[in-house]
Image: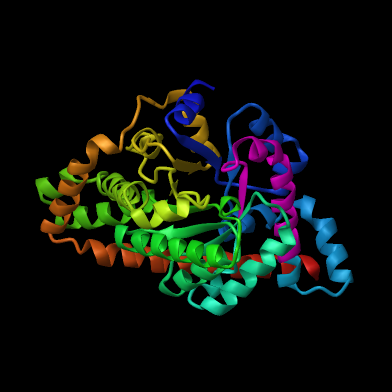
Amino acid sequence: MGNIAKLRDYGVSVWLDDLSRSRLTSGGLEKMIKDGEIAGVTTNPAIFQAAISGAADYAADIAQLAQAGADAEAVITKLTSDDVRNACDLFADLYRETGKDGRVSIEVDPRLAHRADPTIAQAKELWKLVDRPNAMIKIPATKEGLRAITEVISEGISVNVTLIFSVERYREVVEAYLAGLEKAAAAGKDLQKIHSVASVFVSRVDTEVDAQLEKIGSPDALDMRGKAALANARLTYAAYMELFENNPRFQQLAEQGANVQRPLWASTGVKNPDYSPTLYVDQLVAENTVNTMPEKTLRATIESADIAGDTIRPHLEDAQRIIKKIIHLGIDFAAATQKLEDEGVEKFEIAWNELIETVEDAMK
């Protein structure tokens, strides 16, 4: 586990971006934990859609719930919350040892992404249903989701904020988190028990920006391919440093036991086969970060990543230069990241609707 140990030594927690019933029942997930490969798990609607669709190991539960009169959405809630609870139990020892790791995330219905009040209600419901202190409830970082994040944090619930694509939105997410901590403190909640990560999506930024650079087609534009995502993530980390390491507001909360909201690098599997399979791993190393990887990226990291220390802080000025140059070339970077947020919500909605259809067919 050389490379995973190196990442851990440099302050990076490695989480697996996948969960299924077969990983739980086969002992595969437990082995990955015991072998020290992973320190947490993230899920999303697309992951559960892939896990449940056509999987025989969910059939008995679906049949039993159908006979009891449950509808498809109730079945999905039961199946996914059971899987997350069981995964939380596998990570229980690691959670007790570290406090911050051993986490398993479950996401609210993506169709609620633009509705704050139903998101708050479902987040509370999922937290109660999973009933494990090392669970995290995923809430999309839409404009409407920001208010939900504050309210859910204020209830003492740990939150994984997902679908962050821009530094500007990340700053708003941190504001929502700090406001939630302040409300929690005023209500007498134990701030030490509240944890949060801010999931910044990486590879999709390159996919979108690279396509626009190729349309421009000039040598300068083509030379910028594969650089936007890392630059954007690194500038997000610069904002993290400003808002947590050098912020009197957070320091007051820290004195009451508050935890930093760690940046989490999501969507770290490369989409372009010309890029190194560990591009978004070994180039995004810094303390107090999480990298959640699909298993293919995890295996590549173990086998071939070049982990050689902090690769974020030394490159912050270069990151600013890259984003400025991309904008100078004619790309509306703010519009590109907003498009990615909109598409991210839409993709999860599609996956969720497909999952409902799959479960309905299985119930029949």
Q: Main secondary structure of the magenta part?
A: helix
Question: Does residue 167 appear in the picture of this structure?
Answer: yes
Which quarter of the figure is the N terminus placed in? Answer: top right
As drawn, 239 above or below 102: below
The residue lying at 33 percent from left, 37 percent from top is 275
Q: Is residue 87 magenta?
A: yes
Residue furthest to the top: 2
Q: Nearer the viewer, residue 64 or 172?
A: 172
Q: Is residue 71 left or right of residue 297?
A: right
Residue 315 x/y as whole percent: 23, 38
Residue 316 x/y as whole percent: 23, 42
As drawn, 172 above or below 23: below
The residue lying at 46 percent from left, 55 percent from top is 253
Residue 28 x/y as whole percent: 70, 35
Q: Is residue 93 magenta?
A: yes
The residue lying at 50 percent from left, 37 percent from top is 13
Q: Is residue 128 left or right of residue 326?
A: right
Q: Which residues are magenta?
A: 77-105
Which quarter of the figure is the C terminus placed in? Answer: bottom right
> In the picture, residue 22 is in which quadrant?
top right
As drawn, 361 above or below 131: below
State the scheme by which the image is colored.
rainbow
The residue lying at 62 percent from left, 41 percent from top is 102
Q: Is residue 333 left or right of residue 283?
A: left
Residue 255 x/y as whole percent: 47, 50
